[in-house]
Amino acid sequence: MRHACKKISQLASDSLDRPLSLLERLKFKLHLSMCGHCRDFDHNINLIHKVTAMIHTTDYGQTRLSEKQRQQLHDNLNAIK
Amino acid sequence: MKKVDDGPHSWLHEHGDYLYRFAMSRLHNEDLAADMLQETLLAGWKGFDKFAGQSSIRTWLVGILKHKIIDHIRREIRGRNLSEAVENDPTSAYFNSNGSWSDAPAAWKENPEDLFSNEQFYKTLESCINKLPEKQQIVFRMRDITGEDTETTCKTCDVTSTHLHVLLHRARLALRTCLNIHWFERGNRS
């Protein structure tokens, strides 16, 4: 079974981006039930995925144009219009 | 007829912060985000006749901004020729020739909330992302940080969905290893 780890790691990554087919899901689950390394890998990348998703929702929540940027934009709009 | 207050100056006043935030969350660069905002306001002004009034001004401007950002990223990728061939497979480094792990992943005990609120971890994560090859960085940021859907990511980066999955797999393998070395293995809780 070990020979399949590379392919299984691709499926673990894919499962974050697309629904796996029935066959892929079976293969994936079966392998994970027997392989601790791939279970850890799957857990690791899911953890990273969750943290990065949180960054997006909160990171820019407070972001605002600075007064300088705002003034610059007004000036540029005046110049071009 | 155009109402006097429907000009780019009033859009900047009312929707500027919102649009800027939208651009920042995708471009992570203040000057660039401000440039895109300016282009959006101007394009909106020029094309205002086409605004059907079926959506709000804000939704309409966001639509224009989205296209400006996609165009920008596409130009960036083309201009710097950031192609990454599928054949040249960097994932071999993580596996033995028989396909088993050469550097076996270990269990990580932390939960996402604690990691997220830890500034040191955030810095480590950022520096690991910055070490990825540029095209992997772009697709990883679009998919996992911005949360863009697969279709938009493929369209923007000019890749097929199969190629996208290959790039993301590479990015996640590299990121996992980098974080393991610089964070988890060290027991780094400072």
Image (spheres, coloured by chain):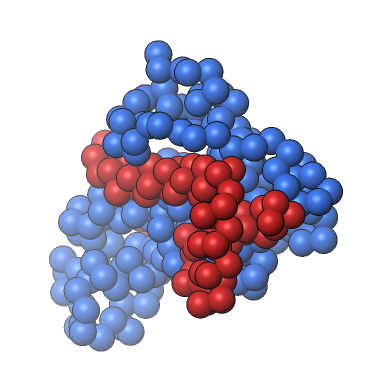
In the image, residue B154 lies at what x, y percent? 57, 69
Is A6 drawn above or below residue B110 in the view shown?
below
Chain letter, colour red in render: A
Which quadrant: the C terminus of chain B?
Answer: top left
**Residue at the image position 58 percent from the left and 49 percent from the top:** A35
Front-lying residue, B19 or A79: B19
**B139 relative position to B54: left or right:** right
In the image, residue B186 lies at what x, y percent? 53, 18
Q: Residue furthest top?
A: B190
Which quadrant: the N terminus of chain B?
Answer: bottom left
Is B170 drawn above or below residue B1 in the view shown?
above
**B160 relative position to B143: left or right:** right
In the image, residue B68 lies at what x, y percent? 47, 64
From where the camera sits, is residue B131 visible? yes
Is A38 drawn above or below residue B151 in the view shown?
above
**Residue at the image position 61 percent from the left and 54 percent from the top:** A9
Quadrant of res B102:
top right
Colour representing chain B? blue
**Residue at the image position 77 percent from the left and 61 percent from the top:** B86
**Residue at the image position 51 percent from the left and 55 percent from the top:** A33
Quadrant of res B177:
top right
Is B59 drawn above or below residue B36 in the view shown?
below
Tally of numbered discs: 0
Front-lying residue, B125 or B19: B125
From where the camera sits, is residue B76 visible? no
